[in-house]
Amino acid sequence: KCPLCQRYVAIAMRFIVSSVEVQKSISKHNEFAPFIVLSNSNLLDFVRSSSAVMAAMSVTQTGQSIILKNGGMKSILRLINHLDFFIQREAMRCVANFAGSHRFRQYVVKEGGVETVTVAATTSGGIDVLRDSARAFSSFSIDNATRSIMIAQEVSKVIFKLSKSSDSQTQRFAALALCNICLGTLNQRETVVKQGVLRLLLFLLRYPDVEIERCAALSIAALSLGSIKNKTEIMKHGFIAPLISTTTYPDKNIQRYAVLALNGVALGESTETKIGIYKEDQLSSLIALVKSEDVECIHSGIYILGTLAENMDIRNFFVSSDALHIIVEKLATGSIEVKRAASYLLGLVAECKDYHYLLES
């Protein structure tokens, strides 16, 4: 019962429990309860050891299962608000690991995990804590029910702050969380826009980080689908120019996501959105995509040209730009998706008898 020996044993357990075999042994002999007791100790070393042990165990599903069966989640969430930074960091790492598990994520949410992480992300100044809070949000936001909770509690505003962190990993996790939130229902998407997400997405779309730019472009694509209100706001915030500029990036995924966002804005009966995209660079960037060697970019480029060509003036300009032969060529050699998109575009052109001679030639 030597206090010094107890401290050394507690410290040693931080490293030993990372082994799955040790975790199975702890489960078999019901030896996890002492770590819950240690989390309530008045001795800082014991509380640190408890938080470190649970963080190490949370890396594996075996360890996560043991923690949940023994009621450890409440202790973990309580430790996130501890005054000691080491304990905060380990507890937040544990929660982020749980949030990343599709099997156990719901149990964290039921115990108030979203609210606890939100408070920590608002009050903590530790970069490790903020990084793992952003990681937790990126996982929480995957589930529809949890996404609803996050939007209702305006957690997106906390994520806005995290996305401007000086730490690149925190920014990336925050951008991913925003992307997931923007994939919600129509009502959720319109609510997020009211909370001010567009101003931040415009900043992220121009940020010099490929992963962040991808998430921003995909977020805009999701927000634009099916919502006239959101499309109007996207146009007002000046997204068209940076999105068209993004289609010229060397990264193919960014090109695809940018075109997807533009197409989301253009879809529908509104003439203003189509004209707005057309006027920005006279379709030159979109036609350049069709000329590329990437199948997905070719398909995306032809698809949005078809959407824009639903407007008669844009259709006439497209035909006069001498790009029709490119579409015909892709119709003959492209994938089935490319053929469908090309067929739709050529069908729109064929509606005008004056262009039949071009199609026949």
Image (cartoon, rainbow, N blue to C red):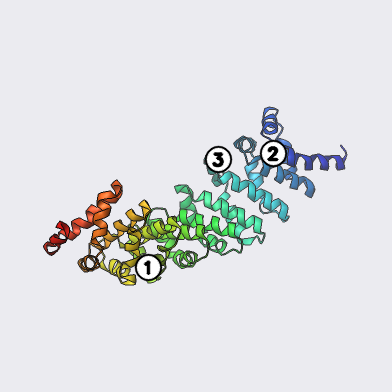
* Quadrant of residue 348 within the rendered picture: bottom left
Question: Image quadrant for the C terminus?
Answer: bottom left
What residue lies at 51% left-to-right and 57% top-to-bottom? 211
Q: Position of residue 238 (x, y in %)?
A: 40, 71
> How many numbered badges does the structure rendering display?
3
Instruction: Please state which of residues 299 and 206 is positioned toward the viewer in this rendering.
Output: 299
List the residue tagged with mark 2: 18
What amino acid type is highlighted by mark number 1? Ile
Does residue 119 appear left or right of residue 334 in this picture?
right
Instruction: Tell me which label, 3 or 2, sits earlier in the chain.
Output: 2
List the residue tagged with mark 1: 240
| Residue 19 appearing in the image | yes
SS type, badge 1: helix
What residue lies at 61% left-to-right and 64% top-to-bottom? 166
Question: Image quadrant for the N terminus?
Answer: top right
| Residue 189 appearing in the image | no
Q: Position of residue 139 (x, y in %)?
A: 53, 49
Against 77, residue 254 (above or below) is below
What amino acid type is highlighted by mark number 3? Phe
Mark pair 3, 2: CA separation: 19 Å
* Quadrant of residue 2 within the rendered picture: top right
Q: Residues within 10 Å of mark 1 (few under 14, many from 20)?
A: many
Instruction: Tell me which label, 1 or 2, sits earlier in the chain.
Output: 2
Instruction: Please state which of residues 98 and 291 is positioned toward the viewer in this rendering.
Output: 291
Instruction: Tell me which label, 3 or 1, sits earlier in the chain.
Output: 3
What residue lies at 23% left-to-right and 55% top-to-bottom? 328
Q: Residue furthest left?
A: 353
What amino acid type is highlighted by mark number 2? Ser
Does residue 336 appear left or right of residue 28 in this picture?
left
Instruction: Please state which of residues 191 and 98 is positioned toward the viewer in this rendering.
Output: 98
List the residue tagged with mark 3: 104
Mark pair 1, 2: CA separation: 50 Å
